[in-house]
């Protein structure tokens, strides 16, 4: 399969980025709707977040269900589950919802920049200073996304604990997403490669 031109890898990436961009638009609109419902209801409905629960409670239940089976189950870390607080605290819930919308907004901006890069690459105008600058922007967004997501999920953990009083189910700290962090570093390397290639390309044109 060819890299550039019609029906190429770049074309597939352009379509994929466009679909994700459109999905983010819909997601942000839905979250604004939920935010409005949350405010209008006084914190009754509209807020939904994910938390990481210790899986031991689930494993113990499954052990009882599968007591007569020839297998053993062990705890393997956290279980990600969604929860909607009833009579949620309006201020903290609103702040978390706005941060969540902001995170999707950053993702939307990142894919907008990425689409611009893929569009120029589709036209075989690949090694330009603008592409290098855009890829650097994507790298910055990925690097800052990792700690922002961690802090947001940590805030959700505190929000969950303020509504759930049971001690039978423990809430774990959210994992830090090193994948986003290292992906951002890779983008910095790619941006430098694009910049150097752009300089060499301009020097080659002057030589000719």
Image (cartoon, rainbow, N blue to C red):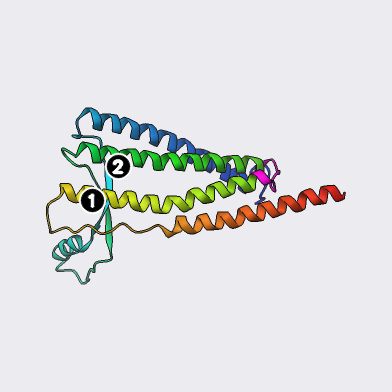
The answer to whether residue 77 is left or right of residue 128 is left
State yes or no: residue 126 in magenta. yes
Q: Residue at x 21, y 49 (%)?
A: 160
Vertical comparison of 77 with 134: above or below: below
Which portion, as a residue range, is magenta?
122-130
Q: Residue 158: which numbered mark, if any?
A: 1
The answer to whether residue 160 is left or right of residue 18 is left
Question: Which type of secondary structure does the marked residue at label 2 adopt?
Answer: helix
Q: Is residue 81 visible?
A: no
Specify which label sits upstream in the sequence, 2 or 1.
2
Q: Residue at x 28, y 66 (%)?
A: 76
Give the labeled residue for mark 2: 96
Magenta span: chief secondary structure: loop
Seen from the viewer's position, the closer of residues 135 and 13 is 135
The image shows residue 115 at horizontal and vertical percentages of 57, 40
Q: Residue at x 51, y 50 (%)?
A: 140
């Amino acid at each position: 399969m060819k890299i550039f031109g019609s029906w190429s890898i770049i074309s597939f990436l352009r379509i994929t980025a466009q679909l994700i961009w459109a999905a983010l638009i819909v997601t942000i609109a839905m979250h604004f709707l939920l935010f409005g419902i949350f405010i209008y209801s006084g914190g009754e409905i509209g807020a939904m977040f994910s938390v990481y629960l210790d899986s031991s409670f689930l494993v113990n239940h499954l052990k009882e269900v599968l007591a007569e089976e020839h297998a053993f189950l062990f705890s393997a870390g956290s279980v990600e589950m969604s929860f909607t607080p009833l009579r949620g605290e309006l201020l903290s819930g609103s702040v978390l919802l706005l941060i969540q919308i902001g995170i999707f907004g950053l993702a939307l901006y990142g894919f907008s920049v990425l689409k611009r890069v893929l569009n120029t690459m589709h036209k075989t105008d690949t090694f330009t200073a603008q592409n290098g600058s855009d890829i650097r922007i994507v790298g910055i967004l990925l690097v800052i996304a990792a700690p922002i997501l961690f802090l947001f999920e940590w805030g959700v953990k505190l929000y969950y604990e303020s509504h759930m009083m049971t001690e039978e189910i423990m809430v774990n700290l959210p994992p830090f997403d090193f994948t986003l962090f290292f992906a951002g570093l890779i983008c910095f390397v790619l941006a430098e490669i694009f910049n150097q290639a752009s300089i060499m390309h301009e020097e080659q044109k002057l030589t000719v």
